[in-house]
Image (cartoon, rainbow, N blue to C red):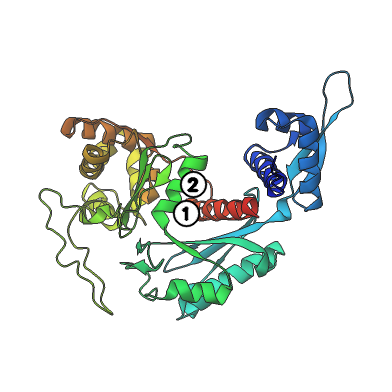
Amino acid sequence: MERRPGVPRLLREINDRAALELLLATGPMTRGQIGDLTGLSKVTASQTLSRLEERGLVEVVGTQAGGRGPNAALYSVIPSSAYVAGLEVGPERISSAVADIHGHTITEITVDPKGHEDPVAAVHEAIVKACRGAKVGLSRLRGVVIGTPGVVDPRSGDVRFSFDLPGWHEGIHGALAGDLRREVTIENDVNLAAIAERADGAAQGVDDFVLLWASRGLGLAVMLGGRLHRGRSGSAGEIGYLPVPGVPLPEDIRTEPGRLPSLAGGLQSLVSAEAVAELAQGYGFAASSAGECVRVAMAAGTRGEPLLDEIAQRLALGVAAVCVILDPGLVVLAGEVGQAGGDALASRVEEAVARICPVRPQVGTTTVTEGNPVLRGAVLAALDQAREELLAS
């Protein structure tokens, strides 16, 4: 029988990956539990854990009482085996967080980008400050994901159609990778919010859902089969351009060097934060922001219901258009307006959609209310990259 010297090594690599992947997904486990869930024998599981310990990837973190025998050692992935950075970039601030391989945020900082004309310098400062706060060298980052408004070209990785970030032109993606000396991923901010929603929020365990982000701008993230759907050009979810009855079409969406497209008209003109604040003022509710206007109206009881009804009717136009094409099981309302409206707004949108659409999805409100959902999504996306790199190594 011909010997295949490469097979034992390949099997060891497969076993190591299976055990490491299990520990990353479920947390501390005993040797016996790892063996049961991977199908490895006790001897093979012990050898696998020994190799992972020698590589500095796992450690004993405690014991678990068993039967009549001695307590079993609990193994876990060493938190410092990999670090990631997530960022949210906006016109007013850049937020950056550094997390360990378990996804635990070590530090989070915010910097003002206005002092930097060059986006690369602004991002560099934010990452360096976050790494310094976490006491983690920049070279130890295994994943960096940056969330921005606008369309991200899946071919070049660059941002297009970003009204808030005019300095983010073609070539920024490559410049960031060169500056940081590592691969960098730029992702649409609403897509990242959807990643956070699926991991920690109202869409946990849901493979098919959409997240409608109603804030200063209007955006939609589409999750199908547990994966983000970005479209050929990265423009899937640009629902602000959606033509709606009784509203002028966007005037001119062509882009030229040094010129941004117009967003006057379309669904954006009905449910952006600016539009909601103007609508609320007409109903007698004025506040410092659109979200606060909605909260004031809700606190007013029955007097505020007509405003909520009107906002729901407007949102339902976009939700219905999405539902007759994608038929998602769940629609999550997020962003400043969606979060402020809560269940009262979500239930109204659900009813309004049912009146004009043969598809009736469940409409709920985001439950990722602690911290920054876009930043959390960036960390989670970076974590997926880091874990895959760690498993592949």
Say above or below: 168 vs 234: below
How far apart marks 1 and 2 lie (CA) works out to 7 Å
Residue type marked 1: Val
Q: Position of residue 43 (x, y in %)?
A: 81, 33
Mark 2 residue element: helix
**Is residue 231 shown to the viewer in this render?**
yes
Q: Position of residue 8 (x, y in %)?
A: 72, 44
Q: Earlier in the sequence, mark 1 or mark 2?
A: 2
Mark 1 residue element: helix
**Is residue 97 shown to the viewer in this render?**
no
Label 1 with label 2: CB-CB less than 8 Å = yes
User: Split into 4 quadrants, where in the image is the N terminus?
Assistant: top right
Q: Which disc number belongs to residue 196?
A: 2
What residue is shown at x 25% (from left), y 38% (from top)?
323
The one nearer the camera, 101 or 34, is 34
Packing grade of label 2 (10 A; few <14, some 14-19, many >=20) is: many
Residue type marked 2: Ala
Say above or below: 102 vs 67: below
What residue is shown at x 17% (from left), y 59% (from top)?
265
Residue bearing the label numbered 1: 374
Residue lying farthest to the front in this orientation? 1
Q: Position of residue 19 (x, y in %)?
A: 69, 40
The one nearer the camera, 315 or 64, is 64
Q: Is 52 situated left or right of 215 in this image?
A: right
Q: Is 121 situated left or right of 71 in this image?
A: left
Residue lying farthest to the top in this orientation? 68
